[in-house]
Amino acid sequence: MLPEFCQKHPRYEKMGLADLCQHVHQLYAKYDIARLTTDMYLSDLTPAMKPSDAYAHIALRKTERVSIDALEGRITVGLITPYPPGIPLLIPGEVFNRQIVDYLKFAREFNGLCPGFETDIHGLVEQVDVDGKTRYFADCVRA
């Protein structure tokens, strides 16, 4: 499996397992991921509207795709759920706070620096732009 994985992701060809572990550890340490994930799940969440009202914005076409950097203070129309652990961070109608946006920024950097080990966050939309760069968005109530 490793030769096939390295063929798909050549950046790992000359990297040993210890090097890979150190690479991942440095990213986790940079963001203090243990503290960040604890803080985001314990952070105060602000409901701005009923979940059914927020979700209805999809059918009414009153949503907009907002980049990670502009999410703080915006209202989500869908679930935002990282896997693992599979516990929703936000439900429709809740507001993105700083801790959640910081975690999404970590996920964006991690995905760019560790291809093949990407974080899976349900509700986060990936789009590749014309330059081949992956950008991340969440669907929100239109401002």
Image (spheres, rainbow, N blue to C red):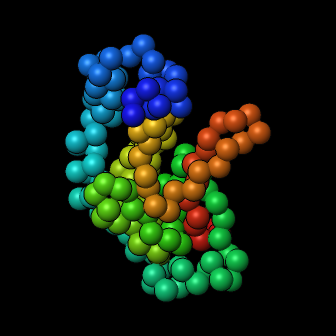
Instruction: Classify 32 as above or below 71.
Output: above
Tell me where residue 135 sits by quadrant. Answer: top right
Foreground: 14 or 113?
A: 14
Q: Report whether residue 23 is seen.
A: yes
Tell me where residue 125 sits by quadrant. Answer: bottom right
Q: Report whether residue 94 is seen.
A: no
**Which residue is found at the position 23% from the left and 59% from the top?**
42
**Which residue is found at the position 58% from the left and 84% from the top?**
56
**Which residue is found at the position 61% from the left and 56% from the top?**
66
Direction from residue 40 to residue 131 in the image, left or right: right
Residue furthest to the right: 130
Direction from residue 70 to residue 119 in the image, left or right: left
The quadrant the C terminus occupies is bottom right
Foreground: 60 or 1?
A: 1
Residue furthest to the top: 14
Residue 134 in picture, x, y percent from top left: 62, 41
Instruction: Classify 7 as above or below 53.
Output: above
Residue 21 in picture, x, y percent from top left: 28, 25
**Which residue is found at the position 52% from the left and 22% from the top?**
10
Direction from residue 5 to residue 32 in the image, left or right: left
Foreground: 82 or 10?
A: 10
